[in-house]
Image (cartoon, rainbow, N blue to C red):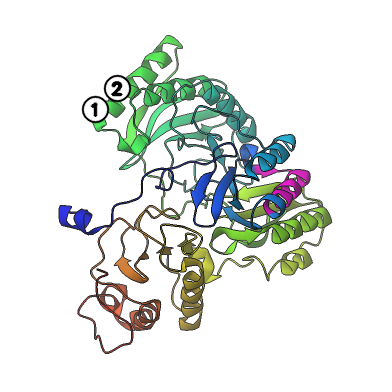
Amino acid sequence: MSAPARQHRRALPEAPTRRGWCPGLARPMPTGDGLLARVHPPLGMLSRDQARAVAEGARRFGNGHLDLTARANLQIRGVSDVTRAPLARLLETAGLGDVRADGGPQRLTLTNPLAGRDASEAIDVTALARAIEAAGLAVPGLPAKTLVVVEGRPDVALPDADCFVVASGAGTVAIAAGTAEGRRDLVTCSEQEAPALVAAFLAAFARTGHRRMRDLSDERLEDLTDTLRALCRVRDLPCAVDRRSGNVAQGYRPFAPAAGLRTVSGHYILAIDAPFGRCTADSLDRVVQVADAVGADAIRLSPTRGFVLLAAPGTDAAPALAALADAFIVAPDDPRRGIDACTGAPGCASGSTPTLADAARLAEALRSLDMSPLAAHVSGCAKGCARPGPADLTLVGQDGLYGPIVGGAPGDEPALYLSIEAVLERLGRAKTVGLAAAFAPDTDLTMSGRTRRPA
């Protein structure tokens, strides 16, 4: 972003409301609708009893609303200073309490929701992720947002992370760093050696004082790589060729199953997404009821901001999926799947627009226009909490209007500001003239909506 653009932006609020705060149960985050407490399910899985406890906690000690995050965590909204302690006690009793008190990550790893149940995995993903979690707890000073993706197949499009541990063959993995340019493979080792090597790499990273691996300079990353490779030489382990492989490749399989019903490795998979990552305590209870009905072993959280259930063999899961259609996304072509949205006003003190309602209007417009799939982000402010990176169309809220950014991120500077009505009108034109032309500042301004900059 240019210096003038940075000067134009309103100053972001200081902690605790700034982006980057990582709330837990003991350290909830103030928001516009009370405190927000984040629950970090181990390995991204809830037992049915644990899911019931989360729903009960949200209903009794919050405002009944839940967020599902892109890291497969849950957030209970509307907690107060009076209810935060009993909420923490309830969830600790259920095995969902905080695991660190030093400001480090409460959960370190992210795995595919089908980890351990996909016959094509070349390693034991669940056991490896559990071992990396245990080793990571011993790393002092590890930044709260540190994330390690553990994946059992080499042909998967991976989400952004600080470190990757990806199967490279039967029982072997490649350890990679997440850089600004993409994934950089560093060393290969057996899955048994990986936890110690990952812990050593993360310890070296923690000593740099940076919050994310992608913020390191090439020189600093090379220092970390040298540390890791020296340890490999001591252990007589092979070093991989240093290459930038990127996190997404054409033709790669998705990291998490899309909404709907399918079979994987002989299992019926029921996948649902929460619209814009939001559901209620009552709808979570309904998911538990469906899990009971289909004999699911666990309620698996997905980085698509949803849940995945593995139905017992011989179970007809189609009626169960249909029973959730009024509260969740149940089809892969639902346009809401391509739209990220933060809480916005009035739930977030930093937002000035009703992002969730406007995201729903945007989805309906895309459905009625029958446009090709569009990745969009409706952000209540320039922090971009729901999607820090670029999207086909990013709408950045400010003073009740939206700044449209085509192909950019929330931190980029919009060229104009529009009401949501004007955004939707211009979206209709995009089908014929393209997004860039439809949202250009010189577009015909006879359409309704304002195009001024907020003061």
Q: Kindly identify the residue that appears in the image at 57 percent across and 51 percent down.
A: 256
- Label of residue 120 in the image: none
3D distance between C-alphas at marks 1 and 2: 6 Å
Q: Which portion, as a residue range, is magenta? A: 45-58
Question: Is residue 29 in view?
Answer: yes
Compared with 317, 58 (above or below) is: above
Q: Is residue 135 left or right of residue 344?
A: right
Q: Nearer the viewer, residue 432 or 366?
A: 366
Residue 297, quarter of picture: top right
- Find out whether residue 108 is within the magenta segment: no
Task: Reply above or below: 219 against 85.
Answer: above
Q: Position of residue 52 (x, y in %)?
A: 76, 49
> Where on the picture, by quarter, is residue 411?
bottom left
The three-letter code of the residue at mark 1 reads Glu
The residue that disc 2 covers is 223
Camera-side residue of 129 and 61 = 61
Instruction: Find disc 1 in the rendering and name its residue.
Output: 219
Question: Label 1 crowding class (10 Å Cα cut-off): few <14, some 14-19, many 20+?
Answer: few
Image position of 12 with respect to 321: above or below: above
